[in-house]
Image (cartoon, rainbow, N blue to C red):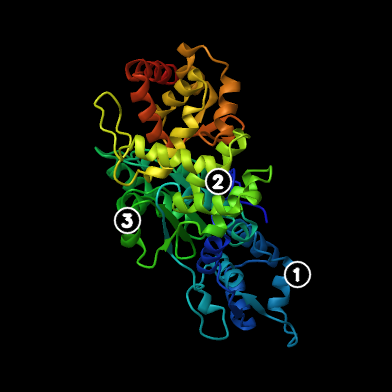
Amino acid sequence: MAIDPRSILPPKPRLFLGRSSDLDILRTRLIPAPTKVTIDREKFELIRKKRSYSYAKLGAQVKRIQPNVKMSVSKLKELGSVNPNINRTLVHEDARVLATALGCDLQDLSMEPVEAKDNIEAIMAVFGLPGFGKTTLIRTLAHRSEFNERYPLILSAALGREAACFPTLQEWCSRFKCDLSGVDGKTDEEKSSKARDRLIPHLMPLRLLVLIDDAWTAAQVQLLNVGSQYSSTVVTTRIHAVAAAIDPSFHSLQRFSEGEGLQLLEYLVKDGRIQKERASAGELVENLEGHPLGIEVAARFLQNQTETAVKSLLNNLANTVLSQPLPHTYDNPNLPRASSNEDHASPTVNAVFKLTTDTLPVNVRRCFAYLGLMPPEPHQFPSTRISDVWESLKVDVSTTIRMLLDRGLLIRESRDEYSIHSLLKAHAFVVLNELKAIPEAVRAYQIAFDKHMN
């Protein structure tokens, strides 16, 4: 099914770490079984002639409103035919688009009472702790054919702590040639509210899926929820109170079971060690508390440390946790705010991060530490920004990026766009502290930022 070219899609996920059951739940709530509507021939013809629409003109109007609705001229002629044997039953959505094209209510065309819309969720929240796959889930959804068929128009937004909404609304408005002249305000909320009011009429007849990733407040969601009664909005958040405020029946992403964790380990560690040490691998999943990102980084550690047995990794993790308990928050005054109570991992997951970065060459470890100054996922940054931040370190940028990618410490979003998970960003701050490299890293980041602003 063709996606509306005005869509703004998130990047494709690099690896789906979640359960198929999570997608099944979203599918159930967002793609209901289609209901049927029987068109009344006399009502249809009366309204069509009153509007002075030929079948061809009406077909063009339907296509303009919803390009993916299959409503040929021959089908429209059948709806107006006096032949009593013609099947005039349409799925609810096609009938709704036809009514919109004719400028009437769906009830004005139907032979029986109908609901105003299909039984779909107007807004759905997905709650999950950091590293549980919220961003990956929402990106997977955006690129699945069944969701694209139901929602040919998709608008996505990547937020984060204290993210402004107006830039996102500006981008959306540009896609629909929505004029924002005269839109001003002292705050982002004031400007965003005015922009939203301008945009909504352009979207009113469209079937739209709005994807809002990493919302921190219900106010952000309210400003970006621009869909009509025929649309749905999916929001991911790490904050339980936000999920409950916008969707009392929100869906929670759960920790991996032992079986699910073993499956991920086997997928990423290709040499058979997981099968040979299945009991130790199961213990590893349990010690990591089923944390999807922690399991992924542990798997990539094993894949790169080919001589390390799973049992040895378990012992190393235990020793690391005991010898160096890691803080959950980082409040060094020389650094931007890195984390909060919503942004910490368990001691064992932090230990996996530490073991991974401790095995890096010294210059690569310093490069990783500098990435702690980048904005966290879902925000992205190009390789040129990375190169500028690392300029003083005199490293081969491409080789260093590949090494960090191989260890799960950096995410490739597209050919030349990258991101870092918020938990790994927080760990990078720990490494900065250990290296006593804070002033030089902040200065390198500021130079890179200035280059991209000029």
Compared across the picture, whether 274 is left or right of 222 comes to right
Q: Where is residue 360 in the image (x, y as percent from the top left)?
A: 51, 25
Which residue type carries mark 2?
Leu
Disc number at residue 242?
3
Q: Earlier in the sequence, mark 2 or mark 1?
A: 2
Report the quarter where the N terminus lies: bottom right
Mark 2 → mark 3, Cα distance in angstroms: 24 Å
Report the quarter where the C terminus lies: top left
Q: How many labels does the image show?
A: 3
Q: Is residue 423 visible?
A: no
Q: Earlier in the sequence, mark 1 or mark 3?
A: 1
Q: What element carries label 3?
A: helix
Q: Residue at x 45, y 45 (%)?
A: 157
Q: What element carries label 1?
A: helix
Q: Position of residue 57 (x, y in %)?
A: 66, 62
Q: What element carries label 2?
A: loop
Q: Where is residue 33 in the image (x, y as percent from the top left)?
A: 58, 74
Kindly report which numbered mark, 2 or 1, lies closer to the viewer in this rendering: 2
Kindly report which numbered mark, 1 or 3, lies closer to the viewer in this rendering: 3
Q: Which residue lies furthest to the bottom in this view?
A: 84
Q: Position of residue 355 (x, y in %)?
A: 47, 33
Residue on which the image places disc 1: 74
Mark 1 → mark 3, Cα distance in angstroms: 49 Å
> Are the two marked residues, 2 and 1, in contact with CB atoms closer than 8 angstroms?
no
Which residue type carries mark 1?
Ser
Q: Which residue is drawn at 52% across and 78% down?
A: 108
Disc number at residue 9?
2
Compared across the picture, whether 296 is left or right of 77 comes to left
